[in-house]
Amino acid sequence: MAVIGKIRKHSVILLVIVAVALLAFILGDFVRPQNKHLSEFIIIGKDKINYYDYLDQYNYYSDLLKKNGSENVEAEANDYTFNEMVDSIIVNNQASPLGIMVTAEELRDLMAGEKPHPYAQRFFGGPEGNYNMQLAQGFLDNMDQYDSASVANYLYIEKLVEKETYRNKYLNLLAKSFYTPKVFARKAQEENGMKALVQTAQISYSHELVSDDKIKVSEEDLKKWHEENLYRFPQDNELRNIEYVIFEIKPSERDLQEIETEVREKYAQFVASETPQLFVNTLIDSRFDSSFFKQNELPAHIDTLLFNAPIGTFVEPFIDGDYWMFAKLLATETRPDSLHVNFMFIANEGMQNAPRKKEEAKLLVDSAFLALMNGQSFYDVANRFSDVKPDPQNDSLRVWLEDGSDQIFFDRSTAQEFFDTLSNFMPGIMTRYESKLGTWIFILNHKTAIEKKIQVAMGKKLIEASTETFDNIESAANNFANGIDTYEKFDKKVTESNLNKRSFERLTAMAYNIPGITGSAREIVRWAYDEKTEKGNVSNVFNLNNMFVVASLKDIYPKGHMALDQVRSFVESMVKRDKKAEILTKNINASLAKTKDIHKLATQYKSTVDTVNVSFSDRNFGHYGPEAGLIGKIFAQKANQSLKLFKGDMGMYLVNVMKIDIPSSLQVDKNQGNSAEMFNQQQSMMYQSKIQNSAMPALRKLYKIEDNRYKVF
């Protein structure tokens, strides 16, 4: 009491202090500089997406992905949100000046017409997916009578339909803009019909005259070739090259022995227990699940031993993944897997913002029950009495209740208890279920076929490192990181400590996965892309999922073109190829000065003479592999001229062009005209397909997109 008295005595001073602090907090957002990264979270040319708008969309996609059981919610939600918002801005900028639009009448027809958009069809399809046009149009005409959540869901779907329709109109316009004039089509046909018959002998780049040990490549050679061929190595985004060491948190041999001993002791107590389901709840890693399981739903070892076993059968301790497990068969039943019901919920005081008293709630329940008994539609009664309102996606509050699921209920035990009760009723029965939270009214419509299920008490023990082992591994990671602040020191200490160093050369700013690291690696990625992280820096110890990680930023590869180090092995192979070609060209030309006999030359260079039929449209030159450049050179020759030497990608080629057939484009008969028209149609279809798949990535390159997501996510 004395303390309270003192507080009261100084309450005015306290209120003043709180008021000043609160005012400072409120004004802080106005007086402090605006966070640029939040207002300019993503910049697309002159347009901007702020963080809060992005987050709203991201959260929506995250919820959808979680409901669908996605394993990579954060990464997928980010991709969906980024693509949808960025593409929407780009398409609007491209399509708006062209007069493309989606009218209100068109949108209504897409949402509630005879041929609705697939999104609308699913939205108004109810739980069984049967689209109801009358229901859809009724919803649009009376939207103000529906709850805000249903309206918000509808408006979001409508916006998606509008954006997709708008985008498709623009892409269709692009696709239909393609046309190949008949003269060009005929010319392309002519080129595709060009054929040649050649004699050839290949002198491979693996020839003994130019074996790798005889070819010397300098750093200047590599730099020169790389600079001359930069066009081959576009890099649309900045990349980072990191090297890292993983200290995996694994149980020691002593830990494993102690865990097994503990499990076997617990199993003995489990066997002796008269209430195994309660005993399971005393274990740290176990909770009793009262559900009944179908065959193949339980861990394979338990399922095999117990599904057809007598009640009371035990499964001795065994290892399943990261757990020790043991089990006992408690019961078997034949029961349905799902129940199809109509339901409504009338909340007690305090639930669903219900202001009513218990007596008022009971009166509502009785009134709803009586209305249903008198034949009124469930939909109308639910609209009047239920605190969970029907919506167009579920027009009569219908749902399939699954055995073992906590659908519509607020806890799993309540759901299972009611399912057990309702599964014994016949379809058509109406019943109520009361709890502290409120009252459910159900009509049982259908039951799936009954099948055998078993109830099992399962004990589990996680196989994990002890606290002592964890501390030892953490200490090892900290000792490694201590005193190293450059890549050179990092690399040296890895060697001295005989550790396994890993590398990831193409780390993007929004990467979620790094090889060898379980779970999300975003913390490492954010460090690598932080503005304060410089090339050669070494990180602190990252405490991730079951491991500690120390990383070093080895290199930064700016946007534009790939650096030589990124493509060094490829460049080196190309430089060697060119040097080999120079040596072989010099030697073979000297031989050609003495003889033009391809057979003698083939013998001299330990090759064979081959006859190849080749078309101008071919990618491969016979069995020698891809040689597009060589094929082009062949068709630039005339038949029956002297033997020529050509440089190819796979080797040097002695070529004797024996025959070339080139269809004439001067005379175009009806069949050729029809053929040209067919070719034009094929090209148009290919272009349309390309537009659908490649237009948006190509358009993104036209806009300067600044993506700051990596600073937050």
Image: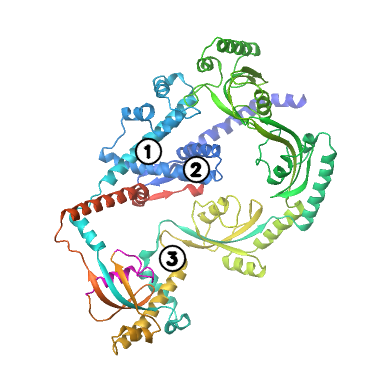
Q: Nearer the viewer, residue 383 or 272?
A: 272
Q: Which residue is mark 2?
A: 77
Question: Does the magenta portion include 628?
Answer: yes
First of labels 2, 1 by sequence position: 2
Could you say whether the residue bearing mark 3 is in a helix, strand or loop? loop
The magenta segment: 617-638
* Colour logic: rainbow
Say whether residue 110 is visible.
Answer: yes
Q: For this view, does 323 lie left or right of residue 694?
A: right
Q: How many marks?
A: 3
- In the drawing, what numbered circle is on residue 563? 3
State the residue at coordinates (56%, 56%).
514
Q: Position of residue 245 (x, y in %)?
A: 62, 61
Quadrant including the N terminus: top right
- Expressed as whole percent of the image width and height from the top left, the position of residue 112 reads 38, 26
* Marks 3 & 2, CB-CB < 8 Å contact: no
Q: Main secondary structure of the magenta part?
A: loop
